[in-house]
């Protein structure tokens, strides 16, 4: 399993009148977590796009357990529970506050698409090579 953590501080503009992070902002928090997780592997979304592959979101599920507030330092935990096969990749993500309490949990499914034809394709080889060690017998 691959796990990465990223921190983000809640900005004032991300909160509503109740001093709670507006629910729609979690899609952006999850995106930051995914982008930074891939960057931690030594690859980037920009590298992927330069290779002719894009990753649109096709499904997002989110469960809100506790609120986050202005100026909270959040930890976004991004997990891949299995090495993707084919055109589909599924990220499981969790958001924690500074006290380590789980605030939000989500699952996001993306497809690898060829940028020119918009057809399904496979994960770029450099990303697969970076992820593979996390899914060996010893790394599982």
Image: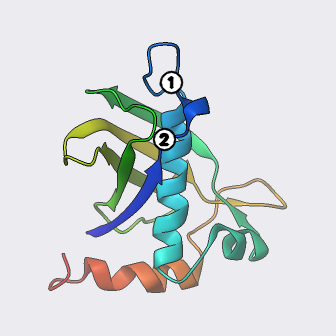
Residue at x 42% of width, y 23% of height: 20
Q: Which mark is residue 56?
A: none
The residue labelled by disc 2 is: 10
SS at badge 1: loop
Q: Earlier in the sequence, mark 1 or mark 2?
A: 2
Instruction: Establish if 97 lies above or below 90.
Output: above
Q: Position of residue 28 (x, y in %)?
A: 56, 42
Using the numbered discs, state the Cα–Cα distance from disc 1 to disc 2 in whole angstroms.
11 Å
Name the spot of residue 123 as percent of width and height, x first. Answer: 56, 70
For mark 2, give the secondary structure: loop
Q: Residue at x 54, y 50 (%)?
A: 31
Where is residue 51 shown, x and y percent of the image?
74, 77
The answer to which image quadrant residue 46 occupies is: bottom right
Q: Residues within 10 Å of mark 1 (few under 14, many from 20)?
A: some
Q: Is residue 101 left or right of residue 112?
A: left
Q: Tag count in the figure?
A: 2
Height in image: 62 above or below 42?
Answer: above
Marks 1 and 2 close (CB-CB < 8 Å): no
Is residue 56 in sight in this rendering? yes
**In the drawing, what numbered circle is on residue 22?**
1
Q: Which of the two residues, 101 or 77, is positioned nearer the viewer here?
A: 101
Q: Quadrant of residue 137?
A: bottom left
Dot 2, how many residues are within 10 Å of its Cα: few (below 14), some (14-19), or many (20+)? Answer: some
In this rendering, position of residue 56 left or right of residue 126: right
User: Which residue is at a point 58% across and 68% down the rendered structure image?
Assistant: 122
């Amino acid at each position: 399993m691959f796990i990465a953590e990223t921190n983000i501080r809640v900005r004032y503009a991300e909160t509503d009148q109740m001093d709670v992070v507006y629910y729609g902002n979690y899609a952006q928090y999850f995106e930051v977590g995914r982008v930074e997780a891939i960057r931690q592997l030594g690859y980037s979304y920009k590298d992927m796009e330069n290779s002719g592959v894009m990753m649109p979101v096709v499904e997002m599920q989110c469960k809100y357990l506790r609120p986050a507030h202005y100026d909270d330092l959040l930890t976004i935990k991004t997990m891949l529970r299995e090495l993707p096969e084919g055109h589909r990749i599924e990220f499981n993500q969790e958001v924690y506050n500074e006290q380590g309490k789980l605030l939000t949990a989500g699952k996001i499914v993306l497809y690898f698409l060829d940028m020119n034809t918009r057809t399904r394709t496979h994960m770029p080889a450099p990303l697969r090579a970076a992820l593979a060690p996390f899914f060996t017998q010893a790394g599982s």
